[in-house]
Amino acid sequence: MPAQTPLATRSAQMIDLSKSTWRHDLDTEISRLEGLLSDLRRLRDESYPTNAELAAAPLLVNPEPVAIPAAAFVGLAVGHPQHGVKPVRTSAVEILGDTWFRSSNRIYRVERYEGLVQ
């Protein structure tokens, strides 16, 4: 029987010490991981995500898992802080809920609309 790849396995962000931006890159990664760690602690304490956080989160329409070094989704982002309304591939999925997920970068709400052409 072939080995299966776990859905949520991902590699760490690469910090290239040969780049002049490595300190900034490291600070960015630390900040991202601190945000994830905070969200994981809140999930453990059963207080994540709040209704307000879900209401403010981008909506990913017709999410489909895609293969990258870790599990992620592709879909139509609605209300994304950087992309507005457009098709996106999310960063690695860290937490997967029934109607939401936490990627490496942010929380997303998810909905499926049948017949929507992307």
Image: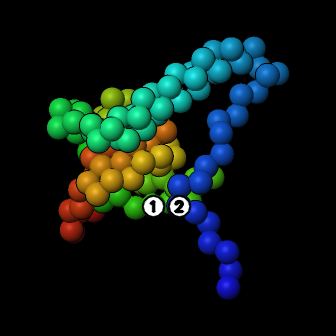
Where is residue 99? Give x, y as percent.
Answer: 26, 54
Where is residue 46? Give x, y as percent.
Answer: 29, 41
What SS does tag 1 mark?
strand
Q: Is residue 70 visible?
A: yes
Residue 19: quadrant of the picture: top right
Q: Residues within 10 Å of mark 2 (few under 14, many from 20)?
A: some
Disc 1 residue type (three-letter): Pro
Q: Quadrant of the N terminus?
A: bottom right
Q: Is residue 87 visible?
A: no
For this view, does 2 lie left or right of residue 32?
right
Residue 54: quadrant of the picture: top left
At a point 53% along the width and 30% down the height, the residue shown is: 33
Numbered mark located on residue 52 in the image: none
Q: Quadrant of the C terminus?
A: bottom left
Given the current orientation, which residue lies at the most extreme bottom position?
1
Q: Which residue is mark 2?
A: 7
At a point 59% along the width and 26% down the height, the residue shown is: 29
Does residue 34 lie above or below 87 as drawn? above
Mark 2 and 1 residues: CB-CB less than 8 Å, in contact? yes
Q: Earlier in the sequence, mark 2 or mark 1?
A: 2
72 or 34, which is in the foreground? 34
What SS does tag 2 mark?
loop
Does residue 13 lie above or below 64 as drawn? above
Circle count = 2
Q: How is the image coloured?
A: rainbow
116 or 40, which is in the foreground? 40
Q: Which residue is mark 1?
A: 65
Given the current orientation, which residue lies at the most extreme right position?
18
